[in-house]
Image (cartoon, rainbow, N blue to C red):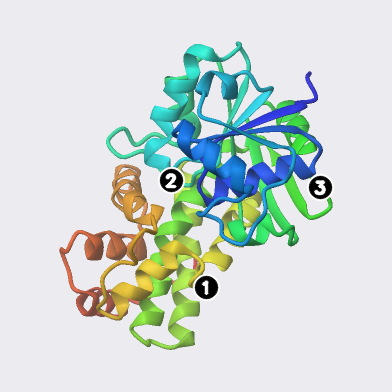
Amino acid sequence: MTSFNSIAVVGAGAWGTALAGVAARAGRDVILCVRSAETAKAIAAARSNPKLPGITLHAGIQLTADISRAAAADAVLITTPAQNLRAAAAALAPHLASGTPLIACAKGIERGTHKFMTEVIAQAAPKARAAILSGPGFAGDVARGLPTAVTLAASDDELAKYLVQALGSATFRPYHTSDVRGVEIGGAAKNVLAIAAGIAVGKNLGASAQAALTTRGFSELARFGRAFGARPETLVGLSGLGDLILTCSTPQSRNFALGQALGRGEAAPQGKLAEGAFTAPVLVELAAAEDVEMPVSNAVADILRGAVTIDDAVEGLLTRPFRAEG
């Protein structure tokens, strides 16, 4: 199997730029693919990306707007938002060599199709080998080389092992697994639950309520995961519980920030995409289909679509029948 000496990153947002730096620090030849030639030229000239201010691009990162050039790399990281993953994979597909790994770096479930990220890749780019990278980490921390651990999953565990070796370094530690669905569920569900935690803070419900929402939310995540075949050790690992703890506790999380704004009665933060807002309705639809009880996630989905007020949603959660832990 190839050692993946060349890595392309499709999507030059903050996370894509940070991961390009990760691959460069790991000693790979890196291509960062952006939307336009003008943007590529501007970032290359400045050696910085306005979407990740204060960070100087690693000297080894090349910029391009040519998707075919990105597709020629040994492996490709797709860092576009979850709802744009299909378009990115489809654009890469005609130019890919058979068996090229496409690694989804977004956390979500596709609206309309109810497909998880690797399923989207399998449909849009059938010649590729799908994988997913997820876990607790903020772009700024990763770009600055602060210690970060994530999970990389592929159905072929040997592929996952090689990809981990290609991206890992002293400060960026990916752990590998073949439990693709567990990693996808952890990343998608925690975004919805982070909105709930943010609402609790915005409404000044107290630290006890935030802790309760986080832990009860994790119970929901675990129930949902079991229904879809996720392994318990994945759900309590970096891409499940670890990511949930991080994003339920800090405004650096876009989903938490959205919830906090809603709790305060404010408009959603401008220019910040919260994946959980797109994932919430899909998550609860999938849960209902498998008869999985998810009261916190349902409350978030109802709040987002304007079906209930936050006060009514909180009252609904507090007046649920008492039950056993679990």
Amino acid residing under circle 3 = Ser
Secondary structure beneath label 2: loop
Compared to residue 162, the image places residue 297 above or below, namely below
Distance from disc 3 to disc 2, alpha carbons, whole Å, reads 26 Å
Look at 45% across and 65% down and name the residue there.
Answer: 217
Look at 23% across and 62% down and name the residue there.
Answer: 302
> Which image quarter holds the N terminus?
top right
Task: Please rate how many residues cluster around mark 2, counting C-alpha atoms within 10 Å: few if below 14, some from 14 to 19, many from 20.
Answer: many
Mark 1 sits on what residue? 250
Compared to residue 322, the image places residue 298 above or below, namely above
Is 220 left or right of 43, judged from the image as shown?
left
Q: Nearer the viewer, residue 27 or 174?
A: 27
Amino acid residing under circle 2 = Gly
Mark 3 or 2, closer to the camera: 3
Distance from disc 2 to disc 1, alpha carbons, whole Å, reads 20 Å
Query: Which mark sits nearer the N-terminus, 1 or 3?
Result: 3
Secondary structure beneath label 1: loop
Look at 72% across and 40% down and name the residue there.
Answer: 23
- The quarter of the picture where residue 157 lies is top right
Mark 2 sits on what residue? 108
Look at 52% across and 73% down and name the residue there.
Answer: 250
Secondary structure beneath label 3: loop
Query: Which mark sits nearer the N-terminus, 2 or 1?
Result: 2
Query: Which mark sits nearer the N-terminus, 3 or 2?
Result: 2
Task: Please rate how many residues cluster around mark 3, counting C-alpha atoms within 10 Å: few if below 14, some from 14 to 19, many from 20.
Answer: some
- The quarter of the picture where residue 90 lies is top left
Q: Are marks 3 and 2 in contact (CB under 8 Å)?
A: no
Q: Nearer the viewer, residue 233 or 147?
A: 147
